[in-house]
Amino acid sequence: MQQSVEALVRVLESYRGRDKVIRTACYGSQLVGGVLSRKAESDVSSQRLGKSLLLFSAQLSHCRTVLRLFDDLSMLAYSHGYGFGAGEEDAGVRWISVLTNVADQLYYPCEHIAWAADAKLIKVKSDKWWLFSTVLWGTSLLLGILRSIRVLLLLKKKLKKHERDGADNSRSQLHRKMRGEVLSVLSSMADLSNAIHWMPPGFLWAGRFPNWLVGMMGTVSSLIGLIQMSGGNSD
């Protein structure tokens, strides 16, 4: 029990770890709140709790939006460090990663403008800026899926080569990397389904997800992120 508490404290002490915990709580609340709010009208207490959880989820989402006001420089530093991906062995992975970094870098100022407009700090309409940020987020997720698929194909080729050579240690490392990429694909697909839901009505399934389904997709993605972070810390 004490080790679990200490592990949670270590996660909460880091910015990325705290964001992942807040994200999980946000979508988890939306999932449970969405389920409870759909109950029969006679079950007033469950509906009231469901609405409270949905409001709590909205506040946590707003909290994450405010915290992202300070992410531009760290994203810029990462993009600058990656550059044009000279360290990547595969050209496809390199250019997909570069485009992903561009989409991520542009996402932040668009979201900041949308947030500032909603907060009445600037006199512009926020709708189009929220749309721009959603499109950029979706683009980044789609590129991330393509990158992971490309990496999986490359790892599969390496795995076949190592199986012929009989290198057991290398095979276990490759299997672990492949599992990580599969988790990344699942996480990005869950987030991409929500990104499409938040697009303007008429685009695929935009606006058709109930609260509980949005919460479920986000919870799946968030839990995968926590698993990947704990796995990375273990390594």
Image (cartoon, rainbow, N blue to C red):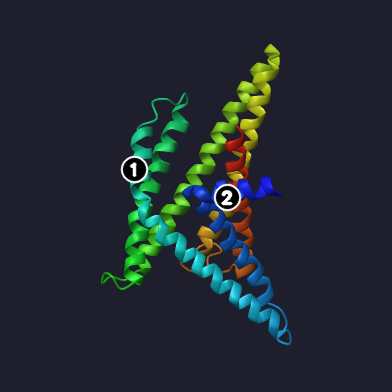
Identified by mark 1, the residue type is Leu
Residue 120 versus residue 172 in the image, above or below: below
Q: Nearer the viewer, residue 7 or 78?
A: 7
Of the two numbered discs 2 and 1 in the rendering, the one whose residue sits closer to the viewer: 2
| Residue at the spot of label 2 | 9
Residue at 35 percent of width and 63 percent of height: 129
**Residue 114 horizontal/vertical position (percent):** 35, 65
In the image, farthest residue toward the bottom: 42
Residue at 65 percent of width and 22 percent of height: 159
Q: Is residue 80 left or right of residue 152?
A: left
Residue at 60 percent of width and 69 percent of height: 211
Neighbourhood count class around disc 2 (C-alpha, 10 Å): few under 14, some 14–19, many 20 upward: few
Residue 230 versus residue 5 in the image, above or below: above
Identified by mark 2, the residue type is Val
Answer yes or no: is residue 160 visible.
no
The secondary element bearing badge 2 is classed as helix
The secondary element bearing badge 1 is classed as helix
**Residue 87 horizontal/vertical position (percent):** 42, 25
Snapshot quadrant of residue 74: top left
* Quadrant occupied by the C terminus: top right
Residue at 59 percent of width and 67 percent of height: 209
Q: Nearer the viewer, residue 14 or 170?
A: 14
Snapshot quadrant of residue 28: bottom right
**Residue 193 horizontal/vertical position (percent):** 56, 57
Q: Nearer the viewer, residue 57 or 168?
A: 57
| Residue at the spot of label 1 | 76
**Residue 204 horizontal/vertical position (percent):** 54, 62
Indicate which disc, 2 or 1, sits on the residue closer to the N terminus: 2
Q: Is residue 22 left or right of residue 101?
A: right
Snapshot quadrant of residue 233: top right
Residue 188 versus residue 154 in the image, above or below: below
Answer yes or no: is residue 89 visible.
yes
